[in-house]
Amino acid sequence: MFESMNHIELKSGDMSPQFERMKNMADELMKYEESSELYSKIVNLITSRKTAISQALNTAMIFLYWEIGETICLDILNHTKADYGRGVINEVSEKLTQEYGKGFNRTSVFRMIKFYQEFPDREKVATLSQQLTWSHFVELLPIENDLKRDFYAAMCKSERWTVRTLRDRKNSLLYERTSISRKPEETIRGDIVQLMDQDKMSLDMFYRDPYVLDFLGLKDTYSEKDFENAILAELEKFILEMGSDFAFMARQKHFVLDGKDYYMDLLFYHRSLCRLVLVELKLGAFEPEHKGQVELYLRWLKKNEMRDGEDDPVALILCAEKSQETVELMELDQGSIHVAQYLTKMPPKKLLEEKRTCLVVREVFDTIRDSCYALLTEICGSLDLEDYVTFTRSPMQINFYNGSKILFRGLDKPAKLKSIHDISLIWIEECSEIKYAGYKELVGRLRHPTLPLFMILSTNPIAKSNWTYEHFFVKRGVDDEQLYRERILRVEDTYYHHSLCDDNMFLPQSYREKLDEMKSYDPDLYRVARLGQFGVNGVRVLPQFEVAPHAEVMAAVEAIPRKFKFVGMDFGFVESYNAVIRCAVDNERKWLYIYWEYYRNKMTDDETADALEEFVRTREVIKADSAEPKAIRYYQKRGFNMVAAKKWNGGTRHARLDNTRKLKRFRRIICSDACANCIAELADLTFATDRDGHMIPDEFNRDPHTLSSLWYALDSYDVADVKHNFSKGDFGL
């Protein structure tokens, strides 16, 4: 209106007062618009120049601190006196503080030195100083790992983090949770350089696992809709957790395909990645079928929503649980679909901070599953860590979200140890069972470039003749009796802890009571098993062995309410003997009866079969030495119900130790006086000794064939097991 009025020719005398006022108003408004425009231009000039000046001052200050650090470091390198550096720095910082203020005190000067040491590349400092302040660098300097430090520096530059944001990201262990932290160093370094120089983020730097959504305030039970609503209510915090370059696009994105409705949970756009990001929420565990669903969504987005210049869409499946084994098998750890777990509370930092490979070792691998692996699984459950770790059985290991893992191996399969690298923690369970050579082999495997190294050895102190006692007590001058009194000792870099079964929170009271009962019938074993003290298990191998009249033994066997009968056979020919033993167990009392024997040598298989013909008629199960499959097959063809005893993978030595311990758990071993050879071999059987007179717990003063027969006979029976999951066929019933 005002513009059109300016083109009307009017004489002042012809204008009414109203028109005069309107014209004056128009002139004033024109002047105001012109002045406002001019003002805005000047403000923009001032703002841009102030920003440039501020940036220049920031860069100049950062380089000043860097150059001070460089100057001091080079000066110190030119001097050889050990105390020169610290002394001169103290003197220089004192003078600088007097002249320029507390910004140059001793702490600040040492910080400048560290700044130069941690960021020696001048060009990198120049690049970072365009976005980072000195306060950013101060926050970065305490990070010891250079890859982690460069990661946070690059993210600060790319996403323009404030110092507070940087601190929050460090405290939430962002680096440890990103996929990039689990990649090889070369890959990590390459992706950081790409982000730093080209401002291009890789998917590995974008993806995290787990995502910590503790800010959502979710209760113990919630629906998927509740989950979505909580995210949208805290959208800003959710986006910050995902990455600051996120832009929210849609919730429940709808499309129709073949007349069927589909809904995508959450759709975002990521500026640095230049692609759409689909987030699918799953309240339960990840299932393989989720992959197919998300693949369909991605293909639809690529066809219908992707624009020129954008990269292909990617998807993140957020779920409450996931199996790492399943994820890896489906190759979802390296494609356009990523599976991650979300946590509604922050896990203990230790679980995310240190990336360790721990090795748990026993002499025999087959014994680990039901011992160490089962124990650690139980402990994780009792400490409420099940949400933060995953368990796999093939290979047997425990996986943590930061890439840490606990591996389980046996020294009977040494080839499987060679492929393991960067081991920083080793636990040797029942270390007295392994040989000293095995221990030295494991010490050589314990190495890591940065983390402190630890080895844990645990054992029941069977005998002082064991290498464990010799190495850790005798050679180091450690008094075991002092350890029993004080419970904890430290000698140089080794901690000694004397534990009792009372210290084991997982042992039931009934088990402790059974150990207490041993005091009356096997005081030596009581000393070892109950008191946790070194002992020799007695000179006699079977101190509870006794002889009784045959009639009394048979009457006692018949009187057992629920009897378990066993037969075992050891093969022999020239020097050794064919030994067959019949025995019975009173399970309630834990008494073993030996009531029949066969003992001959220099007999062929057919002659022995003829002598044992009664077993064909009785159909008793005979457990025989598995090392003689040809002989077992012959007896089977002759009609004997003979089977091979369980093959022990730990070798002869471990078999002797384990089976001897089993026999020693019986409260009484009562042998019929009709079994003369059993009595001759077992009544006074003693442990062999080395040249120093120390007992050898897996060797005896003679080769007892009847003892081997007992081992085979009791193959399916565990004295300590009160529940017995046996079949009747195991007992010949």
Image: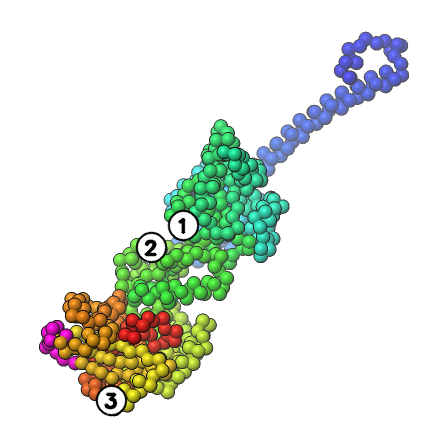
- Viewer-nearest of discs 3 and 2: 3
Q: Tell me whether the residue at label 2 lies in contact with that at label 1, contact meaning CB atoms closer than 8 angstroms.
A: no
Task: Return the residue nearer the eye: 46 or 497.
Answer: 497
Q: In the drawing, does residue 145 fall left or right of residue 726?
A: right
Residue that carries the numbered disc 1 in the rendered image:
326
Q: CA distance from mark 3 to mark 2?
A: 61 Å
Magenta-highlighted residues = 599-609
Q: Position of residue 683 (x, y in %)?
A: 24, 86
Q: Quadrant of the N terminus?
A: top right
Q: Which mark is residue 67?
A: none
Label whose residue precedes the other's in the sequence (2 or 1): 1
Q: Which mark is residue 550?
A: 3
Q: Position of residue 610 (x, y in %)?
A: 13, 76
Q: Tell me whether the residue at label 3 lies in contact with that at label 2, contact meaning CB atoms closer than 8 angstroms.
A: no
Residue at 29% across, 78% down: 565
Say which element carries label 3: helix
What is the three-letter code of the residue carrying label 3? His
What is the three-letter code of the residue carrying label 2? His
Residue 131 image-quadrant placement: top right
Q: Quadrant of the C terminus?
A: bottom left
Q: Position of residue 563 (x, y in %)?
A: 33, 80
Say which element carries label 1: helix
Q: How many other residues sit within 10 Å of disc 2, few (<14), some (14-19) or many (≥20)? A: few
Q: Is residue 281 magenta?
A: no
Residue that carries the numbered disc 2 in the rendered image:
421
Label whose residue precedes the other's in the sequence (3 or 1): 1
Q: CA distance from mark 2 to mark 1?
A: 24 Å
Residue at 42% across, 51% down: 324
Q: Is 495 above or below relative to 242?
A: below
